[in-house]
Image (cartoon, rainbow, N blue to C red):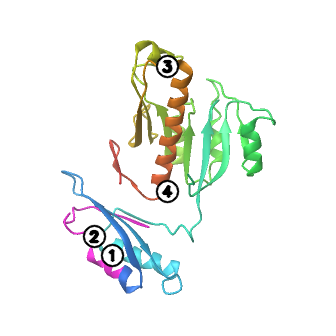
Amino acid sequence: MFQFFLPHAWNPRVSMPPNLSDCIASRGGNILSADVFVPQNKRVFYSRNVFVFDPVMWPRMQMEEDFLRISKTFNAMRSVIRVPALDPKYKIAILVAKQDGRLSVDITCVISNHYRSPENEVIRFLDMHGVPYHYLRTTAENKREEEILELVQNTDFLVLARSMRILSSFFLRSYGKDIINIHHGLLPSFSGSNPSKQAVDAGVKLIGATSHFVTEGLDAGPIIEQMVERVSHRDNLQSYVQKSENLEKQCLTSAIRSYCELRVLPYEKKNTVVF
């Protein structure tokens, strides 16, 4: 997979810069799909290409050099290459609170401010797969962010799985990489304790979940994925909560998969495009 951003709008009727397709063809590669996007009123061109190749004819390092040369030729804002069969999986850490398809990631650790006993099913599952679990009790006065930064320093991005902690500007600037968050769609209408019960009592018929990048503004980062589902008066509080939690899991999984497959194209703070 190759993701290519140009600072000037390319002709949207053209699938990709000819140098790119010529390069892949000249190395014996075969393009399987080519997605392009030219946002309205933005002088930016995005291209995502999936292709197959023979690693003997086109060694990975040679591929890196070829695409780097093309990126420099077009003064690309960013170019990313991923060869899932050859490249290391993304290393991620997951920050969770009380609750907890196949993704191209290696989970380096799970960090939580909630204690779980060794007999807990989550702990047993993590032990089975060799994933360390770090319990860090936090308070309003001590969020233990420096300890968290130490634990996640070798990761490619972070995932907040229903984590209730608000990361400070210090943490975001110190980490310096992408952080993906998930939350239910009842905010801001139903905030505070037990938002699901508030929504049931109010007769809400549509629930949702939103996954987005974390920025200094609370829940204000660029959106990656959103999902919705209808509920009715036949749902009690238990089924309502279960549907909401399932939706959050699906939404977060979809967002992580899109990120790993180079389908997420953030080009400014207020917009994120997924294709």
Give the residue type at disc 2.
Met
Residue bearing mark 4? 260
Residue 254 horizontal/vertical position (percent): 47, 47
Front of the two marks 3 and 1: 3
Q: Of marks 4 and 1, which one's residue comes earlier in the chain?
A: 1
Residue 58 horizontal/vertical position (percent): 48, 83
Label 4 neighbour load within 10 Å: few <14, some 14-19, many 20+? some
Residue 220 horizontal/vertical position (percent): 39, 34
Q: Is residue 147 visible?
A: no
Residue bearing mark 2? 16
Whether pointer 1 and pointer 2 mark residues with C-beta atoms closer than 8 Å, the reply is: yes
Q: What residue do we see at 29% from left, 71% from top?
A: 74
Residue bearing mark 1? 20
> In screen coordinates, is 97 left or right of 267?
right
Q: Cα distance, mark 3 to mark 1?
A: 50 Å
Label 2 neighbour load within 10 Å: few <14, some 14-19, many 20+? many
Give the residue type at disc 3.
Pro
Q: Of marks 3 and 2, which one's residue comes earlier in the chain?
A: 2
Whether pointer 3 and pointer 1 mark residues with C-beta atoms closer than 8 Å, the reply is: no
Residue bearing mark 3? 195
Circle 3 — which element?
Answer: helix
Up the image or down, 189 lies above or below 138; here it is: above
